[in-house]
Image (spheres, grey):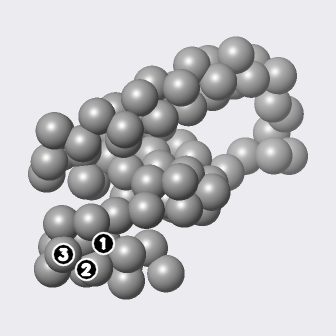
Amino acid sequence: MLDKNLKHYEHTQKINVSYLDLLSYSGWNGMIYLYEKAQELSEIKERLKKRISEMRITENQESWQSFNFTKRKVTNK
């Protein structure tokens, strides 16, 4: 689903950032990709800032049982 949205953006220069935000960490990965390509998308920058802030708050509250590889991949970018 993420790939389809990114291809749509490449063809139309339009993207539903709210939808990407709902996709959890895979959506974050898409938002990071778009931000790196088109930094003028200020809505993406603001959502990423918000998500990073939220992640830092909950980071120390997670146990090993809830480890998420996609989250780790996205947060290391």
The residue indicated by pointer 2 is 7
The mark lying in front, picked from 3 and 2, is: 3
In which quadrant is the C terminus drawn? top left
Where does residue 44 sit, x and y in percent of width and height? 36, 41
The kind of secondary structure element at disc 2 is helix
Q: Residue at x 15, y 80 (%)?
A: 11
In the image, residue 24 sits, relative to residue 11, either above or below, namely: above
Q: Residue at x 44, y 54 (%)?
A: 17
* Amino acid on which the number 3 mark rests in the picture: Thr
Q: Residue at x 41, y 29 (%)?
A: 46
The residue indicated by pointer 3 is 12
Where does residue 58 sit, x and y in percent of width and height? 74, 23
- Asked whether disc 1 touches disc 3, contact meaning CB atoms under 8 Å apart, the reply is no
The kind of secondary structure element at disc 3 is helix
Mark carried by residue 35: none
In the image, residue 13 sits, relative to residue 41, either above or below, namely: below
Crowd band around label 3 with a 10 angstrom C-alpha radius: few (<14), some (14–19), many (20+):
few
Where does residue 28 sit, x and y in percent of width and height? 47, 50
- Asked whether disc 2 touches disc 1, contact meaning CB atoms under 8 Å apart, the reply is yes
The mark lying in front, picked from 1 and 3, is: 3
In the image, residue 39 sits, relative to residue 70, either above or below, namely: above
Mark carried by residue 6: 1
